[in-house]
Amino acid sequence: MIHRTLAAALALLAATPLAAQDAPAEAPAAMPTGEALKAAVEANDARLFWGFFEGCDPELVADLVHPDFRMLHDLVGMPSASGAEMVAGATRNCDARKPGGANEGYRNRRLFVPGSRRIQQLGDWGVLEEGHHTFHEWRRAANDGAGGWVQTGGGRYIHVWKWMPEEGSFRLLESLSLDHGPAPSYPPALD
């Protein structure tokens, strides 16, 4: 009986590639902390909004969105109930900006308001990020065709980033987008 068990074990070992025999199993990555955590969230935030706004390339940032992503928006309700839905909707919007599209030439930009970000670690599984941002659209001047960016509004956002230890990265799990409003008049009225 021992010989059969030993023979079976040797046969299994022989059938396993040498690389698999020698390679240690990779341990899941630990979530960063401190400045590394802050830097990772800030980089994800910048990359996410670039892909969905000015860069208009949602597929480029799809890896930042968790499959179970959900977004709540104060003006429109729940525009996205999954990561795939979020990316698909943004892709449709970006396709409409291309030549021949319904919104050909439309350009918009999201700018983070410096000093408004708050980051809070959530146990060893995620991060809460809160901040303010402004929204801008490119407008052409009527006479000479030149143009520039015009602030059209602003808002506040709260993101929950989930740590994905197998990937060694964060993915956006939930987004609460609120306090949207028109751009304040400038210069301000003097009383």
Image (tube, rainbow, N blue to C red):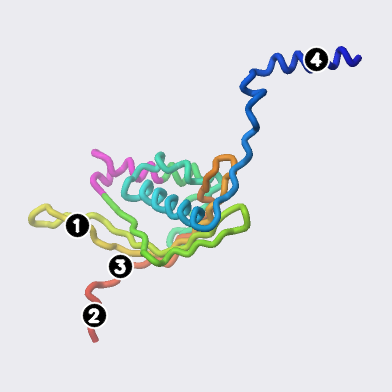
> Given the image, on which type of amino acid does mark 3 rest?
Ala
Q: Which residues are magenta?
A: 90-106
First in sequence, mark 4 or 3: give its number. 4
Within 10 Å of the Cα at label 1, are there few (<14), some (14-19), or many (20+) other Cα atoms? few
Helix, strand or loop under label 4: helix
Pointer 2: what residue? Answer: 189
Q: Position of residue 18 (x, y in %)?
A: 64, 19
Within 10 Å of the Cα at label 3, are there few (<14), some (14-19), or many (20+) other Cα atoms? some
Image point (27%, 63%), residue name: 151
Q: Which mark is residue 8?
A: 4
Say which of marks 4 and 1 sits in front: 4
First in sequence, mark 2 or 4: give its number. 4
- Please say if the residues under marks 4 and 3 sit with CB atoms less than 8 Å apart: no
Helix, strand or loop under label 1: strand
Q: Where 149 falls versus 100 (above or below)? A: below
State the count of labels. 4
Pointer 3: what residue? Answer: 183
> Given the image, on which type of amino acid does mark 4 rest?
Ala
Tell me the quarter of the image containing the C terminus.
bottom left
First in sequence, mark 1 or 3: give its number. 1
Q: CA distance from mark 4 to mark 3?
A: 74 Å
